[in-house]
Amino acid sequence: MKNIFNVLSAMLLLTVLFAGSGCEEFREALEDGGATYDDPNSETYRPRFVVGVFSVVEYPRASDLEKELPMPNGRTVWINTNQNFSSKNLREVRVIPRPGNPDICDLQFRLDRQGKILWQMLAGNNREIPVVLVVDSRYAGKFIPELPADDGRQDNWVTLRAGVDHYTARGIVKFAKKNYIHYNPDTSSWFSSLFGGNDY
């Protein structure tokens, strides 16, 4: 009898959650994995919409450093698996609507200091040569990297004219900051945990 009561209580709780917070919000909470999975400082955090930028391999030899990626148009592109840039150096993302084409958009990346250096190398080595934007190991678009503004600031933005679909763009924007925190943990917390939180 007690087990039946527990099952009925759980069903009632789920009904209240669906009715009170709305189905859409509940679905989003489930997709986010709950509070522990949503905290980038947590060991249980799962990075999502992870960004990588890779060079195109024009004449693939199917070596270990090459990978074939399927594209939405049914064709494939070969990339060098040594990535040139990743979410580790991506502080923030903005979406730029593509004029005349509401189905796709471009992106702006806010880079950290190391990211700016990596991007300068990427742009310098790929002048007029497209590179591939990969999100969660899937092809997201091609673009020619533009140099960041050399104004001495730490919050440099670069534009990616990659023609990304809106779902992917929203996901990159949503998780960019959390992924950055996850890949760049605050080292000061390591010492506080070693010494029981005391200040020395």
Image (tube, grey):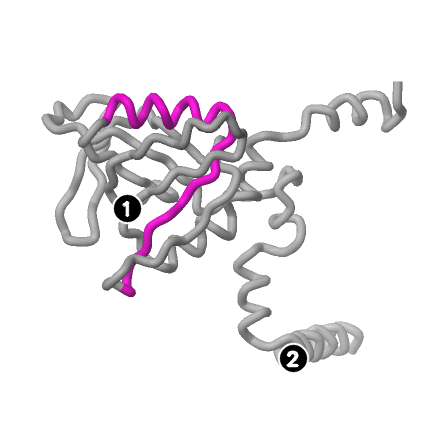
Quarter where residue 18 is shown: bottom right
- Work out which quarter of the rendered image holds the C terminus and state it: top right
Mark number displayed over residue 33: none
Mark 2: secondary structure: helix
Identify the mark nearer the N-term, 1 or 2. Answer: 2
Say left or right for 13 vs 128. Answer: right
Q: Which percent across, then down, holds residue 158?
A: 39, 38
Residue at coordinates 68% horizontally, 24% vertically from top-left? Answer: 187
Q: Nearer the viewer, mark 1 or mark 2?
A: 1
Say left or right for 137 vs 36. Answer: left
Where does label 1 land, which residue? 162
Hey, what amino acid is under mark 2? Thr
Quarter where residue 190 is shown: top right
Residue at coordinates 23% horizontally, 26% vertically from top-left? Answer: 126
Q: Which percent across, then down, holds residue 10?
A: 70, 73
Where does label 2 land, which residue? 15
